[in-house]
Amino acid sequence: MDSKRIIVNPDGQVVPCCFFANSLYVSKQHGYPKKFDIKEYDFGLKDELTLYSLTSAETTTDPILNSYIEQEGELNAHNNPLHEIIDHDWYHELYASWDDEEKVSPICVRNCTDEV
Ligand code: SF4
């Protein structure tokens, strides 16, 4: 967020970065899976191309991503102006989550945690 950039997905969802954009968009194409069982995936070409297994796991376990999904209508550029979306409660929830080990998104941990 320091770069003061956001991403608008092809469906109008306004997200903070490409990491959230990809996970959210792919998961949405699969109907936001509600459960993840590794035995259900054959990890063949289709699963690999769509990252279905990864995004399914994220959709079922990530509190920040799930909070976004619950409020996605309000976070869509087709429904609300950008200046209102980037000041939406979800963005404040995201910022606060960075200081909360129990709430931080695995997406943020995986992609933006500094190694020490
Ligand atoms: S900290 Fe989270 S929201 Fe920010 S760029 Fe990294 S993955 Fe995206």
Image (cartoon, rainbow, N blue to C red):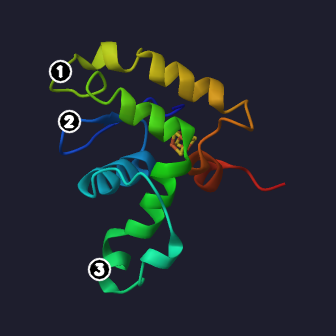
Q: Nearer the viewer, mark 3 or mark 2?
A: 3
The amino acid type found where label 3 is placed reads Lys
Residue 70 can be seen in this image? yes
Q: What is the x, y in percent for residue 70?
A: 38, 30
Q: Earlier in the sequence, mark 3 or mark 2?
A: 2
Q: CA distance from mark 3 to mark 2?
A: 25 Å
Q: CA distance from mark 3 to mark 1?
A: 33 Å
Q: CA distance from mark 2 to mark 1?
A: 9 Å
The amino acid type found where label 2 is placed reads Gly
The answer to whether residue 42 is left or right of residue 97 is left
Tell me the tag on residue 12.
Answer: 2
Tell me the tag on residue 46.
Answer: 3
Q: In this view, which residue lies farthest toward the left?
A: 78
**At x 50% / y 54%, what residue is drawn?**
58
Is there a contact, CB below 8 Å, between mark 2 and mark 1? yes
Tell me the tag on residue 104.
Answer: none
Residue 5 can be seen in this image? no
Splitting the image into 4 quarters, where does residue 102 fall? top right
Relative to 64, say whether 34 is above or below.
Answer: below
User: Does dot 3 land on a helix, a strand or a loop?
Assistant: helix
Tally the marks. 3
